[in-house]
Image (cartoon, grey):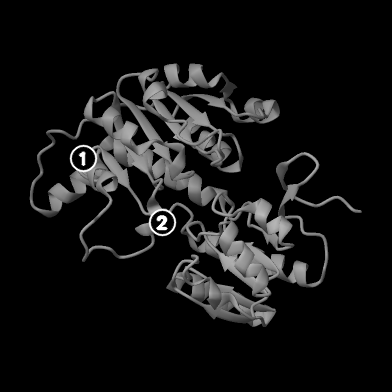
């Protein structure tokens, strides 16, 4: 198979080359993200391999199809940047990596929570300059506090185990509750409104769909406890960043740990330190000393990179063999919905 990998970073190439010794695919790497401006680089390729900030809109997918591309291999779990309906109608198959290392993301969520709460980032910067003052570094004891978890998939449930270990009271909301998981992992389902009202910490672990876009906004922030800490390792679009900034300014929000940002594709994964930041919202967000922003690195562990590349190449091999694609994402013309998993046999 001829595979072209976009947004390829050195660590991506390292693990692709390692695993390709087994698979023997013809792989071309581009460090640039896939956009309408460079989609012609996909000509004569069988599979396009993309990441979270590649732009696979309808126009891009139409050209992919004309170029002969037969499949899109997403090396991530999320697919909100892919027009699944356009891919289906162009007969371009789409598959993903649904679970590469839930522990990686869950552990990073915990790191963000602990860092924001105990002001680790501030203390680190101070002591490197010889400033050992404790003023402004006061946190709260998490034991006995309430954590509200939005979305209760694998990542969230691992995170919940860690919060239980801290002695936190965990409540959760999910559109499709898993009562067995709630019993096993010691958490209770509540309505979204109850979660906003009762939580000292709110952590987002749900996908980005039209009905979850900006679920954290000025109205929902107003319902929250004063001093609430917000953690987001899901997708940036779950939070209205301007509303978050207003909440931080008013001290309604006590702190935020963010691994994602709604307009991150122009900055995240790149070194922009030598340029003037043109995104005024992101620039403002970075000025708050009670905010930690990491550049979508929650997944970035050796274990995750291994699993991502192995699963991606296995997905492509399964497609090449015309076998069942258990990791496919496709558009169901009967229900008018996007479906994850096997297509029904005809």
| Mark 1–mark 2 CB contact (< 8 Å) | no
Residue 71 in percent (x, y) is at 68, 66
Residue that appears at 32% across and 36% down: 242
Q: Is residue 208 left or right of residue 246?
A: right
**Residue 190 vertical position relative to residue 87 in the rendered view, above or below:** above
Task: Please tell me which residue lies in front, 143 or 177.
Answer: 177
Task: Please tell me which residue lies in front, 143 or 36.
Answer: 36
Residue 135 in percent (x, y) is at 12, 33
Residue that appears at 82% across and 68% down: 322
Residue that appears at 50% across and 51% down: 104
Task: Please tell me which residue lies in front, 138 or 245.
Answer: 245
Residue holding disc 1: 289
Residue that appears at 20% across and 59% down: 276
For the residue labelled by badge 1, is the local secondary structure a helix, a strand or a loop? loop
Residue holding disc 2: 265
Locate the N terminus and report the quarter of the image it occupies.
Answer: bottom right
Is residue 344 something one can see in this rendering?
A: yes
For the residue labelled by badge 2, is the local secondary structure a helix, a strand or a loop? helix
């Amino acid at each position: 198979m001829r595979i072209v990998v976009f947004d390829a970073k050195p660590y991506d190439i390292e693990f692709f080359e390692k695993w390709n010794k087994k698979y023997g695919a013809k792989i071309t790497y581009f460090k640039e993200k896939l956009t309408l401006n460079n989609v012609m680089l996909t000509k004569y390729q069988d599979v396009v391999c993309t990441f979270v900030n590649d732009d696979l809109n309808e126009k891009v997918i139409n050209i992919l199809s004309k170029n002969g591309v037969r499949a899109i291999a997403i090396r991530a779990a999320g697919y909100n940047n892919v027009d699944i309906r356009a891919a289906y109608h162009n007969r371009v198959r789409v598959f993903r990596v649904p679970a590469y290392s839930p522990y990686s993301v869950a552990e990073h969520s915990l790191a963000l929570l602990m860092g924001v709460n105990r002001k680790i980032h501030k203390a680190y910067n101070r002591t490197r300059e010889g400033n050992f003052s404790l003023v402004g570094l006061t946190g709260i004891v998490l034991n006995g506090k309430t954590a509200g978890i939005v979305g209760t998939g694998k990542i969230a449930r691992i995170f919940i185990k860690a919060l239980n270990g801290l002695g936190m009271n965990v409540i959760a909301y999910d559109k499709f509750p898993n009562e067995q998981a709630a019993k096993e992992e010691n958490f209770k389902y509540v309505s979204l409104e109850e979660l906003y009202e009762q939580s000292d910490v709110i952590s987002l672990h749900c996908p980005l769909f039209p009905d979850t876009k900006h679920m954290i906004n000025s109205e929902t922030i107003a319902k929250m406890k004063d001093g609430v800490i917000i953690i987001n390792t899901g997708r940036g679009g779950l939070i209205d960043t301007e509303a978050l900034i207003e909440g931080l300014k008013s001290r309604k929000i006590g702190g935020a740990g963010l691994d994602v940002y709604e307009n991150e594709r122009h900055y995240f994964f790149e070194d922009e330190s030598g340029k003037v930041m043109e995104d005024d919202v992101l620039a403002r967000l970075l000025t708050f000393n009670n905010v930690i922003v990491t550049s979508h690195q929650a997944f970035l562990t050796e274990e995750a990179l291994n699993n991502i590349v192995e699963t991606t190449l296995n997905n492509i091999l399964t497609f090449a063999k015309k076998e069942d694609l258990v990791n496919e994402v496709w558009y169901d013309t009967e229900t008018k919905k996007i479906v994850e998993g096997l297509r029904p046999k005809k």
